[in-house]
């Protein structure tokens, strides 16, 4: 080998400097707003997911660095909780209740219908990018099931027919009201 | 003169269209130039009547329900602002039998008051318990709670006063009050209803706990599946600070109590108190070994009271009316009242607060009116996903912690899930194992591995694949989980499984029976 060979010492870049600007900003804002709290990690993860809709795995090193934790610790927490999402969701997230009280009034059939109608399994996003389907284990609406929540909007006594109306309805109202559909018709 | 109308802002009512009703009502009133004032309340918990609209008249509040937005014009036409006749008119709300025949000690203000109005809360007896507590020695507060006979409403039914005494007696410069608002059990919603309908009651109960044990900081750990409760609690906490009921100097007493609301993130196991504390500290929600008890080494290693929402919310009335008043209700060692939740396939689902001692049968038929589907009730599951499945033959059991335990069941948080005769109990048993597998914290093997093996064994059993052997295997596995699990998730999952197979064996042998018939 020639003597001209140069050895490059890789310089460790500052964590997060390679992140898309929006993600970096979301992390830093979440950290700065919650840093002083006792047990700040969950509030920070919630703030990030509220802002971005998910917690991109590439943000974990920055979160860890800012909180003086190891990446393994942060990854361990993010992956432990079902609610924290490491994949980008569709425009709306449908939380479909799978628990006993809803089973007693047809949740199993509704689940099969929802999967067919959206063409997804749980955690999947429909082909048009509109809906992500997530299982949930009780929404506290157990006397009026089957229940589901679209984003933060709860719906009871759901049937396959009403499900179809709803996913149609939400897409139109979302188009006209720029995203935040509120209040439930019918 | 303006007419006051009450419409819930509570989640179930919203899920059935309460916002649309409120909007339609305001629009129609404006069109007719009627002056109305709409107050958004919690729900009384009569869910089959939601959205329930109440009109303030000279004869008290007149109820209409279930109201849909499309009913609004006809309600105006019928003169409902004066309590007029209409197909949906239910008469005076307080005289609806379901509600009238309740003992609402803890849930008395639900649906009555504006949940985020301090004035409304005070006008209905709010903060009188705190006033009394501030005039008492901490030990006397603890004694009042002990004497009331109150036991934890979160599931384990541990005497609340004894827990508080342990924290009161524990040395430590910093102590904590933690409210378990994780309410993960399917079929339960009393915590949610309380937080959405009477949040100051929870805040008052926690503040009294702080005074009793010498804790100046509190947390509410709320499940993230409850965004409406989150909104209401957030508003109420802010108002309590603004009104001087929280902060460094609670109502000028010189005593401090700070309160923060924290969100869970969709893990059932975080309802278990040590897992909850781990989560509050910012970690994975894994169970801690006990001892040490959280009362001695809890949040951040400090002495900590962990109680359920309903436990805390029962404290103000105990301090207001006295321990004796509360303990006069109930039976045996179950004192006071329990907010019971009727759920699943039930005609009149909702909240029934009664003194302990009411029978399952009375709840299912007299209050609940049987199934929503109109078919016979085949099974009920009481006490959440870890509770046993019971057949009709057990419906005369009184709601009492000891009576349920003696029958091989568990009262838990007071949720009753009803199934009609179309239920497949083998599928329910399988789900119990599946749920345990999904929610296991992974700390111990019987639960982490056993639950997955349980699903497989039930699948083979139901398929009729060497059924006798699978049954033996399943019972053996359940025995291991029961005796070898660190916490009640793995330890109690065998209850729904074994009760299903013991009381409904025919559902597990369908394949075998079919094979025998076709042979
Ligand atoms: C798997 C599991 C889940 C639990 N979930 C809850 C819950 O959601 N809410 C609750 O108050 N208690 C729950 N508990 C009971 C708590 O561990 C604890 O006993 C309770 O919060 C103490 O409060 P209490 O004495 O007022 O009932 C759960 C226990 C276990 C084992
Ligand atoms: S029984 Fe299950 S949830 Fe409980 S400690 Fe063991 S693994 Fe964790
Ligand atoms: S079981 Fe579905 S909302 Fe409770
Ligand atoms: S637990 Fe450490 S190697 Fe298996």
Image (cartoon, coloured by chain):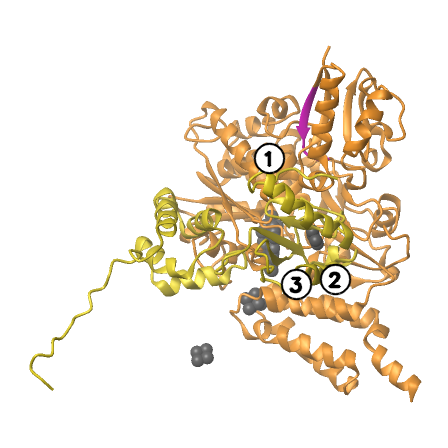
Which of marks 2 and 3 precedes in the sequence? 2
* Quarter of the rendering containing residue B478: bottom right
Asked if residue A169 can be seen in this view, the reply is: yes
Question: In front of the other: label 1 or label 2?
Answer: 2
Asked if residue B215 can be seen in this view, the reply is: no
Question: In front of the other: label 3 or label 2?
Answer: 3
* Quarter of the rendering containing residue A1: bottom left
User: Please, which chain is the residue tagged with disc 1 on?
Assistant: B
Q: Quadrant of the C terminus of chain B?
A: bottom right
Question: In front of the other: label 1 or label 3?
Answer: 3
Say which of B285 and B105 sits in front.
B285
User: Please, which chain is the residue tagged with disc 2 on?
Assistant: A
Q: Give the image location of residue A16, x and y in percent.
A: 31, 56
Q: Give the image location of residue B497, x and y in percent.
A: 73, 70
Colour orange belongs to chain: B
Q: Give the image location of residue B169, x and y in percent.
A: 47, 46
**Residue A108 bears which disc, if any?**
2
**Residue B199 bears which disc, if any?**
1
Say which of A160 and B494 sits in front.
A160
| Residue at the spot of label 3 | A119
What residue lies at 52% left-to-right and 33% top-to-bottom?
B237
On screen, residue B290 above or below A28: below
Q: Is mark 3 within 8 Å of ligand 3?
A: no
Q: CA distance from mark 1 to mark 3?
A: 41 Å
Colour yellow belongs to chain: A
User: Please, what secondary structure does the residue beneath circle 1 have?
Assistant: helix
On screen, residue B268 above or below B249: below
On screen, residue A159 above or below B168: below
Assign ligand 4 to one image quadrant: bottom left
Q: Residues within 10 Å of mark 3 (few under 14, many from 20)?
A: few
Extreme residue toward the top, this view: B1
| Residues rendered magenta in the picture | B37-43
């Amino acid at each position: 080998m020639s003597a001209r060979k140069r050895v490059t010492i890789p310089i460790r870049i500052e964590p997060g400097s390679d992140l898309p600007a929006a993600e970096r900003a979301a992390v830093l804002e979440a950290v700065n707003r919650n840093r002083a709290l006792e047990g700040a990690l969950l509030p920070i993860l919630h703030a990030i997911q509220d802002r971005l809709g998910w917690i991109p795995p590439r943000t974990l090193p920055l979160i860890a660095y800012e909180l003086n934790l190891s990446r393994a610790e942060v990854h361990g927490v993010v992956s432990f909780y079902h609610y924290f999402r490491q994949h980008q969701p569709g425009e709306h997230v449908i939380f479909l209740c799978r628990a006993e009280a809803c089973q007693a009034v047809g949740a199993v059939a509704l689940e099969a219908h929802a999967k067919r109608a959206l063409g997804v399994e749980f955690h999947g996003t429909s082909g048009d990018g509109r809906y992500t389907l997530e299982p949930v284990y009780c929404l506290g609406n157990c006397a009026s099931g089957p229940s589901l929540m679209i984003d933060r909007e709860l719906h009871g006594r759901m049937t396959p027919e009403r499900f179809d109306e709803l996913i149609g309805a939400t897409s139109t109202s979302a188009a006209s009201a720029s995203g935040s559909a509120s209040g439930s018709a019918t | 003169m303006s007419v006051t109308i009450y419409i819930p802002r509570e989640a179930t009512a919203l899920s059935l269209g309460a916002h649309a009703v409120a909007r339609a009502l305001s629009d129609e009133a404006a069109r007719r130039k009627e002056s109305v004032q709409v107050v958004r309340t919690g729900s009384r918990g009569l869910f089959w009547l939601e959205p329930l609209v109440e009109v303030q008249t000279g004869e008290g509040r007149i109820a209409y329900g279930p109201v849909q937005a499309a009913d609004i014009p006809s309600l105006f036409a019928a003169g409902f602002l004066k309590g007029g006749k209409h197909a949906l008119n239910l008469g005076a709300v307080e005289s609806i039998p379901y509600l009238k025949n309740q003992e609402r000690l803890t849930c008395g203000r639900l649906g009555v008051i504006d949940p985020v109005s301090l004035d409304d809360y005070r006008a209905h007896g709010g903060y009188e318990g705190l006033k009394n507590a501030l005039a008492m020695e901490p030990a006397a507060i603890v004694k009042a709670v002990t004497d009331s006979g109150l036991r934890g409403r979160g599931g384990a039914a541990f005497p609340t006063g004894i827990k508080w005494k342990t924290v009161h007696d524990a040395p430590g410069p910093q102590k904590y009050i933690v409210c378990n608002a994780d309410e993960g059990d399917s079929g339960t919603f009393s915590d949610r209803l309380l937080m959405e309908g009477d949040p100051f009651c929870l805040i008052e109960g926690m503040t009294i706990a702080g005074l009793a044990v010498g804790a100046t900081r509190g947390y509410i750990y709320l499940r993230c599946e409850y965004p409406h409760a989150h909104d209401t609690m957030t508003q109420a906490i802010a108002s309590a600070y603004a009104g001087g009921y929280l902060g460094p100097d609670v109502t000028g007493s010189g005593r401090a109590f700070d309160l923060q609301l924290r969100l869970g993130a969709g893990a059932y196991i975080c309802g278990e108190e040590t897992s909850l504390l781990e989560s509050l500290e910012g970690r994975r929600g894994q169970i801690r070994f006990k001892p040490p008890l959280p009362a001695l080494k809890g949040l951040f290693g400090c002495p900590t009271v962990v109680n359920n929402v309903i436990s805390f919310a029962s404290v103000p009335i105990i301090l207001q009316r006295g321990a004796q008043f509360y303990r006069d209700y109930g039976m045996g060692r179950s004192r006071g009242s329990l907010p019971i939740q009727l759920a699943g396939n039930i005609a009149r689902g909702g909240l029934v607060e009664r003194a302990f001692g009411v029978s399952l049968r009375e709840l299912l038929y007299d209050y609940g009116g049987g199934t929503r589907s109109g078919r016979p009730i085949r099974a009920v599951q009481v006490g959440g996903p870890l509770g046993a499945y019971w057949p009709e033959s057990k419906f005369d059991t009184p709601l009492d912690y000891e009576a349920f335990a003696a029958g091989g069941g568990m009262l838990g948080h007071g949720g009753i899930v009803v199934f009609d005769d179309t239920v497949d109990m083998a599928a329910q048993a399988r789900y119990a194992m599946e749920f345990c597998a999904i929610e296991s914290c992974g700390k111990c093997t019987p639960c982490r591995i056993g639950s997955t093996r349980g699903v497989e064994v039930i699948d083979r059993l139901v398929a009729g694949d060497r059924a006798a052997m699978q049954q033996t295997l399943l019972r053996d596995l359940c025995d291991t989980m029961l005796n070898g699990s660190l916490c009640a998730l793995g330890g109690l999952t065998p209850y729904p499984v074994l009760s299903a197979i013991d009381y409904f064996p025919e559902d597990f042998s369908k394949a075998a029976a079919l094979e025998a018939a076709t042979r």
